[in-house]
Amino acid sequence: MLLEVKGLCVNYGRIEAIRDISFTVDEGEIVTLIGANGAGKTTTMKTISGLRPVRAGTVTFNGKDITDLPSYERPVLGISQSPEGRGCFVGMTVMENLEMGTYARPDRKSKAVKDDLERVFELFPRLKERVNQAAGSMSGGEQQMLAMGRALMAKPKLLLLDEPSMGLAPKLIQQIFDIVTEINSQGTTVLLVEQNAAQALKRSHRAYILETGEIVREGSGKELANDPAVKAAYLGGDV
Amino acid sequence: MQFLIDNFWALTITGLTLGAVYALVALGYTLVYGVLRLINFAHSEVFMYGTFAALWVVMFLGGKAGGGTGQVIFWIAMMFVAAMTMSGLIAVLLERFAYRPLRKRNAPPLIALISAVGASFVLAEVMGLREKIVAWVGLDDNLRAYVRNSRNAVGLPDIVAKEPVFTVGGYAVTNVDIFVIVGAITIMVILDQFVKRSRLGRGIRAVAQDPEAAALMGVNRDRVIQVTFLVGGVMAGAAAVFYLLRIGITRYDAGFLLGVKAFTAAVLGGIGNLRGALLGGFVLGLAENYGSAIVGTQWKDVVAFVLLIVILLFRPTGLLGESLGKARA
Ligand SMILES: Nc1ncnc2c1ncn2[C@@H]1O[C@H](COP(=O)(O)OP(=O)(O)OP(=O)(O)O)[C@@H](O)[C@H]1O
Ligand SMILES: [Mg+2]
């Protein structure tokens, strides 16, 4: 088990954003969290990255209890996130953004970084053409690629992707999902949050359904994709 | 108007030296604003402590007028070391005790601002009452020379003789003028490169642009904030040396008006923007001199603020626009 979340509760003041949720991610998997707006998906992702304090429960990564570990120490362990809304450093160039991904790597000066950069450029050739462009002047889709590329530059064991297809044209969504699958097949474990439930379920090994802060269903991607109740609620009827 | 024309070069050179000091102090305001969105009102005192450190080190080591080149270089180097150390230290302590505890408790920005104003008064008064403080701790006799008449202005021994180097339009530009302008610009270029290229500089920009994304990259925000205060303090320390070399005296409240002006320069150039602080400092220094030549020296400070208001009316984000990161500082 690479990631184990157990009985996690997170509050914003007195609002309970997530209540007693438990789930696991195994090494090599793509696991998806789906749920309506406000269900608590982003909160869950931010908590795994250490950006939100935990009220109760534990987060274990690679056998280590990281519940109270400061956020900035988590990338070193191998947790990297492409956040919702991309969070590119708009005043930095594409290259500088990618370099920020290596900020916490102990081997950031080694040749391994160059190889990883090549790999990111292979996945996202568009970034290579735009290395010197300011991230803020890139299109939404390009910024999404940049955020993913930047997260990959940290060489994570676990990649957290919060709505990577948000606001993208259908053709680009397809491409992003292809890339997620590709990243996974190259050996990176992925925890994915998606509104594009149909696509996401098709690509993931397992999935959890989150409703108002609680996990209400879990199952393999296929299982959930073919479940009539899930179809009605999240897939708009047809897959 | 005739006065301005007749003294154009004198006004320009002195305006630039003053502007250099404004710009260096403005950097501290702008850096801290960038990472914390906080106006560090006590930064003026960080500067003032630097002027005293520079002065004390010269007094303590018995600096006198009339030394050779080697000695002059020695004194200036000592002043830089003392002032930068002192200002850097004060800035870091300020962050540690006046701002960090509030941040840890998620205090609203207004509370931090009040803390800043309070810290500013405390620091100024501690310097102004140093005679009393020294008496309390029983160091009265040992430190008399350094604390006497603590509310009066104290002068720097004339360790650097001002000598004309060349003349433009009737104004004899001195070695000190050149040193201040060139020195300040050099320091600012170094800072610019530090923020642009070094790992910590990148961290500063990342936190300024998006603190959460920075944390996801493994940037320790507290560490970055501390370094930012340190860097801002060191810049203020350098400014303090240039200020002393040029003005020659300091006082426990020397930071007040200068701090307000430097803050004005930061806003003028676009707060959060490093190059904006540089530009704002020089523009302000020049405008003050030209303006007061036209309407009278007693209006000098008025000129600075009228300029600020006029520029903000037309460019609300300052000359170079906002943000440490967005302007690709
Ligand atoms: N900073 C915040 N302060 C207060 N409440 C918040 C904050 N962030 C999120 N919430 C609340 O927590 C709940 C979960 O929000 P979260 O962002 O995790 O939802 P989500 O599942 O990611 O939704 P979406 O699909 O819209 O991105 C919501 O009710 C939201 O209003
Ligand atoms: Mg969300």
Image (spheres, rainbow, N blue to C red):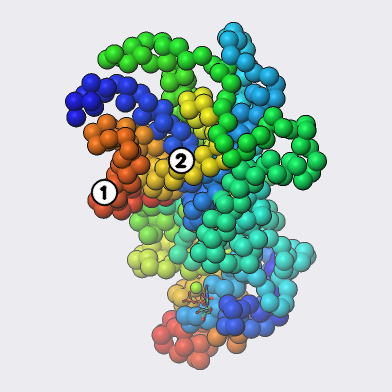
Element at badge 2? helix
Q: Position of residue B308 (x, y in %)?
A: 32, 47
> Is residue A97 shown above or below B297?
below
Residue type indicated by callout 1: Val
Report, in whole angstroms, how far the alpha carbon at label 1 lies from the one at label 2.
20 Å
**Mark 1 secondary-structure assignment:** helix
Q: Residue B46 at what x, y percent from top left?
A: 57, 42
- Quarter of the image where one finds residue A33: bottom right
Give the chain of mark 1: B
Residue at the spot 43% in from the left edge and 67% down from the top edge? A165
Q: How many marks?
A: 2
Q: Amino acid at mark 2?
A: Leu
| x and y, in percent, of residue A110 in the image | 64, 38
Residue at 65% from the left image edge and 61% from the top image edge: B101
Q: Is mark 2 within 8 Å of ligand 1?
A: no
Residue at image mark 2: B258
Q: Is residue B90 left or right of residue A38?
A: right
Q: Which residue is mark 1?
A: B310
Quarter placement of the C terminus of chain A: bottom left
Q: Chain under label 2?
A: B
Is residue B294 visible in this depiction of the protein?
yes
Between A128 and B115, the one nearer to me in the picture: B115
Residue that sits furthest to the right in the current view: B138
